[in-house]
Amino acid sequence: MAEVKTITLNRMKMITWRWLKMNERTVEFAVEGSEGAPEILRPVGVDTLTDASAVADVKGGAGPEVDALLADVAVKGFSVAEGVEVEEPIRIKYELADGASTFDKYAVVVGDNAKVKIIMDVQSAEDATGYAAFQTLVKVGKGAEVDLVQIHRCATGYHIIDDFGADVDETGEFKAIQIAFTGKENDLGGHVELNGDKAKCFIRSGYLTADDHVMDINYYVNHSGKECETDIYTSGVLRDTCYKVFRTTIDFQPGAVKSQGEENENVLLMNNGVTNKTVPTILCGEEDVSGEHGCTVGRLADDLIFYLESRGIPNEEIYEMMAKARLEATIRQIPDEKTVEELVEFNNNL
Amino acid sequence: MAKEKTFVEDVQRDLYDFRDEEIDFYRVDTGLTEDIVLQISEEKNDPEWMRDFRLKCLDIFNHSKMPPWGPSIDGLDLNNIVTYVKPKTGMAGKWEDVPEDIKNTFERLGIPEAERKSLAGVGAQYDSELVYHNIRAEVAAQGVIYTDVESALHGPYGDMIKDHFMKLVKPTEHPFAALHGAVWSGGSFVYVPPGVEVEIPLQSYFRLNAPGAGQFEHTLIIVDDRAKLHFIEGCSAPKYSVANLHAGCVEIFVGDDAKMRYSTIENWSKNMYNLNTKRVTVGKNSAMEWVSGSFGSHTSYLYPMTVLKGDNSKMDYTGITFAGAGQELDTGMKVNHIGKHTTSSVNTRSICKDGGISNTRTSVVIAPNADESKSIVGCTSLMLDSKSRSDTIPAIDVRNQNSDVGHEAKIGKISDEAVFYLMSRGISEEDARAMIVSGFAESVSKELPLEYAVEMNNLIRLEMVGAIG
């Protein structure tokens, strides 16, 4: 097994009481890893990025200790030229080996008014154990649109860190969808800088966490441009004695006039014994903005249960059905039919 | 004809910003040493257990670290703080017996008038000591005890104090709890016997007059089974150029089938570091209500905490914070659901202007056995300009499958649509904006017990009308 060290990641921008144990996450993680050998399908219109320094200013959400962990990793880079709209996604598929430590880093530069989708699907051999750390840093040009989809369906012995960062220029749009099934420990980070006016950020995450596994998420979106928009929605299902922390921060800088940010979370708890922690933060240094947060944690609504029970569905089955439906709702937002079909089937067979 | 223009002004402070000369007051040296703690203990004629407890707290304080979260308290140097200032008087049971200058202070704050009109009892603390304490005869006849903690320590309730003192807020929790345990002085002890309902409120008022001083009053309230109490706390201080410190502590024990309401209007001067700790534990079928207005101080850390220990217990929290120029007010609340079928409802509002910083920090924890519990938290913040800041940091920890927790937060400016609507009804833009701010604050301030104390009215007043030519 790999040599491990203690690292701290997913630290909140503005921390709160320490006794809540939500400010950051401290984990034992592999000291070093090997470059992965994913299957990459690169569609026409996507070039190899020759100079990764283009994303040197882009920060990830997991924090400096993850940056340091991946500092010496060779960057796999893509670029899309100005005005090029790529229909087919870049597909990156991992089949992680038992006992492996995989460290990979991606840089994506998307020119003005270009469009691209990136779908990363991380799987492992059945019953495999191991570590994997990924970081994807994206530069979104003016008027460009980027969809980043990250899917985790590793075996229950795997510890995954998956981190993204994006700098979005004027009228650019960055969309991230993270879906995590199983995995022993999942640490997801995201940091988006809406630098240009009218830049947009859209984040969706869906997760199913069970047994004694851990799901730890940290999203930070900074609004510097005028009239920027952020929409974050997380939907999850927690079972058994699992442990989940969701941190999200919407930050409005002075001058980000008429910007809007909304963060929402909906968590379904399937058992007593789960630990569900949420800290949705709004930081506001500008008067003329609108920031909103809403969250619902717990069980299904009584009227929904009443309705379904009156249709002859037992209570336990209702919960199972709604758990799958939650994940499916997030899956269906992936802008790729092939991936949606595959994941819906995977979800149904869990 | 001159037209009146409406605008939002800072909280009116003139009423509170007067100072009295210190004549023949007793002060310990600045800073915090074992000698100073023993000096305070001696001065207060502590029983042995309390003296030992103070020393233990000092040791904890000396080994504790300042919190890494929250506003900066770099401007607070404990080496420059006097932890005990005793006015030249003992505690009086009649206003006539209070020295003239101190009595005048409380007269100006409207306390004796409020007592006559609408209170069941009043305690008045000046710097480190209670100077006045009184309870209406008919309330005392019900068996209600309302006195200073020091007197209670040496009376028949001494064991009750020992059993409850800093048992809810432990000195190990944070440095300022430990500091409080070491140098506490003054405050009130209230005991409401089983089945007694105190229909009109008790009020304690804390005035810190001495520059560079700290106030560390301890309020201990025990509301026994089936009893009911409304307690009001008010505080103010004149403004000095040096830092003052308030590190009080409030511990409330609510029995079964009981009801407690705790209202606070905090209007410390803008050189004050207000690092206050408040906590209540609530028995089965009981209700706790917090009503909190935070308007003053340079820096505040204030988060009343409720432990819903008994089944079917509930808590309502209503709070408003107004942060103006030079202020950073970090306020909010904490609630822990331990018992089954417990409920909490939280409504916080904050307004910031002229560079003021308002942080709303909350936590809701639902324990594994708190079956069928419910919590709803709403935080709304209004920013009146872009020099100010408003941050919301809500934490939720749920460990129970059959509980429901909802949280909503909203930060923004005055709604253009609302202004437009009011203007379409013939109201000027300025008046419309002021009306919206007033309405925003009113939903919380209407819960404040203004009718009970004239002084309160002054403390929470947001001046909405001024004149221009």
Image (tube, rainbow, N blue to C red):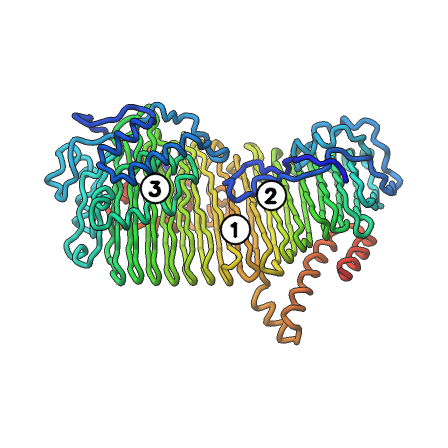
Question: Residue at point 77% right, 28% down?
Answer: A72
The percent position of residue B65, horizontal first and vertical second, equals 46, 31
Dot 1 lies on which element? Answer: strand
Nearer to us of marks 2 and 1 is: 2
Q: Is residue B121 above or below residue B180?
A: below
Q: Residue at x 52, y 52 (%)?
A: B407
How far apart marks 2 and 1 lie (CA) works out to 14 Å
Name the residue nearer the viewer: A283 or A169. A283
Q: Is residue A248 left or right of residue A45?
A: left
The chain holding disc 1 is B
Q: Chain for mark 2?
A: A
Residue under numbered circle 1: B408
Query: Callout 3: residue from which chain?
Result: B
Q: Which residue is mark 3?
A: B249
Dividing the image into 4 quarters, which one contains the C terminus of chain A? bottom right
Q: Which residue is mark 2?
A: A248
**Amino acid tagged 3:** Cys
What's under tag 1, amino acid-wise? Glu
The spot of residue B12 in percent (x, y) is 31, 36
> Which mark, by number, is residue A304?
none
Residue drawn at x 35%, y 26% as measured from the top left: B243
Q: Amino acid at mark 2?
A: Thr
User: Label 2 crowding class (10 Å Cα cut-off): few <14, some 14-19, many 20+?
Assistant: many
| Whole-number angstrom distance, CA of label 2 to CA of label 3 | 33 Å
**Disc 3 element:** strand
Q: Nearer the viewer, mark 2 or mark 3?
A: 3
Is residue B320 shown to the viewer in this render? yes
Distance from the alpha carbon under mark 3 to that under mark 1: 30 Å
The x, y position of residue A325, in whole percent, is 69, 61
Q: Is residue B267 left or right of residue A211?
A: left
